[in-house]
Amino acid sequence: MTLALRYAIRSDVGLLREGNEDAAYAGPRLLAVADGMGGHAAGEVASAAAISALAKLDEDVPGNDLLDALADAVADANHTLHDMVVADAVLEGMGTTLTAMLWSGSRVALCHIGDSRAYLLRDGEFHQITHDHTLVQTLVDEGRISPDDVATHPQRSMLLRALDGRADVEPDLSLREARLGDRYLLCSDGLSGVVSEETLHRTLAKVEDLNEVVLQLVELAIRGGGPDNITCIVADVVDSATALLPPSDASVMVGAASNGSGTGPFRTDSPAGRAHLLTRTAPQVAVAVAHDDPAPRRPDGEERGGHRRQHKRRLPLVTSALVILVVLVVGGVYAGWRYTQSQYYVGEDGGKVVIFRGINQTVAGIKLYSVAQRFNIPVTSLPNMDASTVRATVTSDTGLPGALSVVHSIQADYQRCQTAYAALRKWQAEPATTKKVKVGKKTVTEKVKPPQPAIPADCPAPASAAAGTGGSS
């Protein structure tokens, strides 16, 4: 029996928030939900960066490496947030929760930090398998308040742990065994904080179609007022050989990680849901319309004051057209400039790896890009494939977080080559030892040295200026 996942995912901005700071990922081997915080755009930046850092795990990871792989990816995500804050002080104070599950057959590694949650429905029994890192949960654990007091506690949203790039992160990590027929729910507190556990249980147990399940869960949160962003993933453990429907094979990002708010149109018949749909109607563009304002005419056709109007006071048509054209051109240029400033790509400058902000184009002698961050990674010391990739530039689809993720991957390859050559230099510098060996009746002295360390085939010979380690400058 080969176990696999069939899943559905959905994210919604809710009724009261202007933007979606949640981000989530669902793939054949990875499920993850992050809930960003920090105000302005920082919350969505943090959650998107965390999801982007974990997305690389959606590959065939050996079962005995699951926890280490997940822990390393979370640490990388935390370092990415730190680098982003260093690069842009506006992002100071941002952070994100993270609940993720990494699968290999029947083994599943669970990582959790913050108050997003994971639930398990097994054999009709439904229970939470994560523990909130919040002040109110600590008070409940200590017996100072009851679970019924949590929903109305004034500090119910205060997190004690989160990914924020400030220090070494300490997520809860555990290894679990999945069973055929299990159903898992991962969600942000926009769902679990509004919909009761009993209702979650009933919905997961009675609705078979996964897309319908996630749709109903979001509708329930909207009917409950939708005070926060709502994100959920529901996944079934199936036998890939005998399941009526095949396992899911597409990887999907939603929320801030995808620059979207989920999949498909929202549907609900509740009053809150109808109001929600109204708030999602695209605002109409305001257009200034000039009207003549003639003085009222008398019945005899004379204007007030007994004088006939000699000329109609109108803005000439040509002038109006020119004004509109100028507005359109200026607006288009500004919109284009704003677009370029939201783009990032990795390339080469001065022989080193850099992240550029903008697009790799020059218009009328004006460069549409600038260096956002430099790294002490010589391009000539990179493996051949990485060096070619950097010289050709790598465009990020997820902004700065994606560009940083590319650089971290390149940096890991650079460090691999540097470590290999460092081992070779150490081997060359160490003198051979001697030992006495009997050959027949004679005793001879032989020189002994460990085998020469191997150098990866894709690593170029090091230049003297390339010795050292790479890092952000």
Image: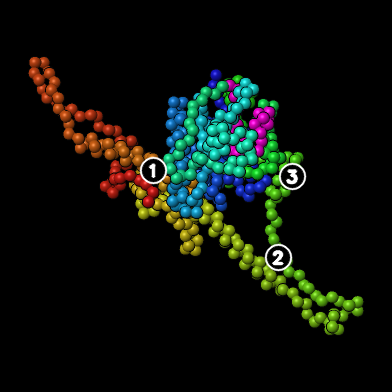
Q: Nearer the viewer, mark 1 or mark 3?
A: 3
Circle 2 is placed at which residue position? 288
Name which of mark 3 and mark 2 comes first in the sequence.
3
**Left or right of 221 in this view: 30:** left
Which residue range is magenta in the image?
180-203
Q: Residue furthest front?
A: 144
Q: Are marks 1 and 2 in contact (CB under 8 Å)?
A: no
- What's the residue type where badge 1 is placed? Gln
317 left or right, relative to 343 = right
| Amino acid at circle 2 | Ala
Choose between 253 and 330: the one closer to the eye: 253
- Mark number, residue 274: 3
Colour pattern: rainbow
Task: Give the image location of residue 440, x and y in percent.
Answer: 11, 15
Residue 372: within the magenta?
A: no
Instruction: Please provide percent x and percent y for residue 24.
Output: 57, 39
> Few, some or many C-alpha atoms within 10 Å of disc 3 (few <14, some 14-19, many ≥20)?
some
Query: Dividing the image into 4 quarters, which one contains the N terminus?
Result: top right
| Secondary structure under the numbered disc 1 in the rendered image | helix
Residue 244 in view in this figure = yes
Residue 290 image-quadrant placement: bottom right
Question: In the image as oriented, which residue stretches furthest toward the right?
Answer: 300
At 69% from the left and 52% from the top, the residue drawn is: 282
**What element does badge 3 sit on?**
helix
Residue at left 13%, top 23%?
Answer: 436
Kind of residue at badge 3: Arg
Residue under label 1: 411
Image quadrant in which you'd find residue 318: bottom right
Q: Specify which label sits upstream in the sequence, 1 or 2.
A: 2
Specify the quadrant of the image occupied by residue 245. top right
* Residue 363 image offset from top left, x and y in percent: 50, 61
What residue is rendered at 86% in x and 76% in y?
297
